[in-house]
Image (cartoon, grey):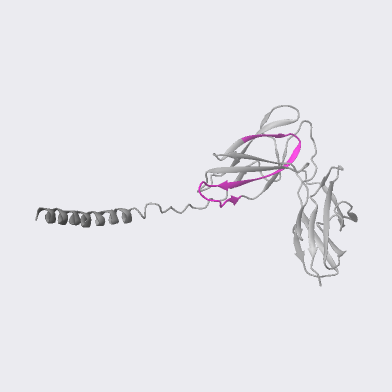
């Protein structure tokens, strides 16, 4: 009789423990659920201002100065990536900041373009601000070259419908507001573009094209003092018939 009683007690103990282990495992299943990370918002650029001369900053030498770049605080953002492009050389630099301003050493007497990318930890989603252009003040500069032209139509990398001709359109700006003319370079070889003449307008019509061809174009901007700037080389493709 004693053996039977002991055997029964062991069975009961197993029946009691198993349910406890089951509920213990089930209770922890929700703990690993991750919270949704909100997407960062775009910053609003403050300084240097768009299409202006930057005459603030600490002069380091005749060639460089340190300028404090400023923008608005962007919601849901942990890191701001400042993208800066030298418009004379097309060289790009990137600076990370955790606050909404940071000093950057740049060349004097040089045009730049800049924008800020907002980033957040835990998500790959980013948000880009608009792009500003400015001149960093240089020693003894009394007149500035125009900013390089930007393509409006066709936009960079566009695919256009079949046609016999096309109208090129661009935009640009100049601190001194003294642009004199634009020269249009065009062709199928980016290294050997052909001049299509000059104009005072910001467009050029009736440029001949053929189907299934890639074209390149560039705008040379000149002010009344002879200062010039070269745009990037833009590209578009005409659809095949």
Above or below residue 22? Residue 111 is above
- Residue lying furthest top in this view? 61
Q: Position of residue 85 (x, y in %)?
A: 71, 43
Measuring from the top left, give residue 166's x and y in whole percent: 83, 65
Chief secondary structure of the magenta span? strand
Residue 138: x and y in percent read: 75, 33
- Compared to residue 229, the image places residue 161 above or below, namely below
Q: Quadrant of residue 56?
A: top right
Q: Residue furthest left?
A: 1
Above or below residue 240? Residue 112 is above
Residue 50: give x, y in percent of width and height.
68, 46
Residue in view at x 31 percent, y 54 percent: 27
Q: Nearer the viewer, residue 217 or 34?
A: 34
Residue furthest to the bottom: 241
In the displayed structure, 59 sits above or below 38; it is above
Magenta residues span 103-128
Figure quadrant of the C terminus: bottom right
Residue 80 in magenta stretch: no
- Residue at (15%, 57%) from the top-left corner? 8
Looking at the image, which residue is at 78% across and 60% down?
236
């Amino acid at each position: 009789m004693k053996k039977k009683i002991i055997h029964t007690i062991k069975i009961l103990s197993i029946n009691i423990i198993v349910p406890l282990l089951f509920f213990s495992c089930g209770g922890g299943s929700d703990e690993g659920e991750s919270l949704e990370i909100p997407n960062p918002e775009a910053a609003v650029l403050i300084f240097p201002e768009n299409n202006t001369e930057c005459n603030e900053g600490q002069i380091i030498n005749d060639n460089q100065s340190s300028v404090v770049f400023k923008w608005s605080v962007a919601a849901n953002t942990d890191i701001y990536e400042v993208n800066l492009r030298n418009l004379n050389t097309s060289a790009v630099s990137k600076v990370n900041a955790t606050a909404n301003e940071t000093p950057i050493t740049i060349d004097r007497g040089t045009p730049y373009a800049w924008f800020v990318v907002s980033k957040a930890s835990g998500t790959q989603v980013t948000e880009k601000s608009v792009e500003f252009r400015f001149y960093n003040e240089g020693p003894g500069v009394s007149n500035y070259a125009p900013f390089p032209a930007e393509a409006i139509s066709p936009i960079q990398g566009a695919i256009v419908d079949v046609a016999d001709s096309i109208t090129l359109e661009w935009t640009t700006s100049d601190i001194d507001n003294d642009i004199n003319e634009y020269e249009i370079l065009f062709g199928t070889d980016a290294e050997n573009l052909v001049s299509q003449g000059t104009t005072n307008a910001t467009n050029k019509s009736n440029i001949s094209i053929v189907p299934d061809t890639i074209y390149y174009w560039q705008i040379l901007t000149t002010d009344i003092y002879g200062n010039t700037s070269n745009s990037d080389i833009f590209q578009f493709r005409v659809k095949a018939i």
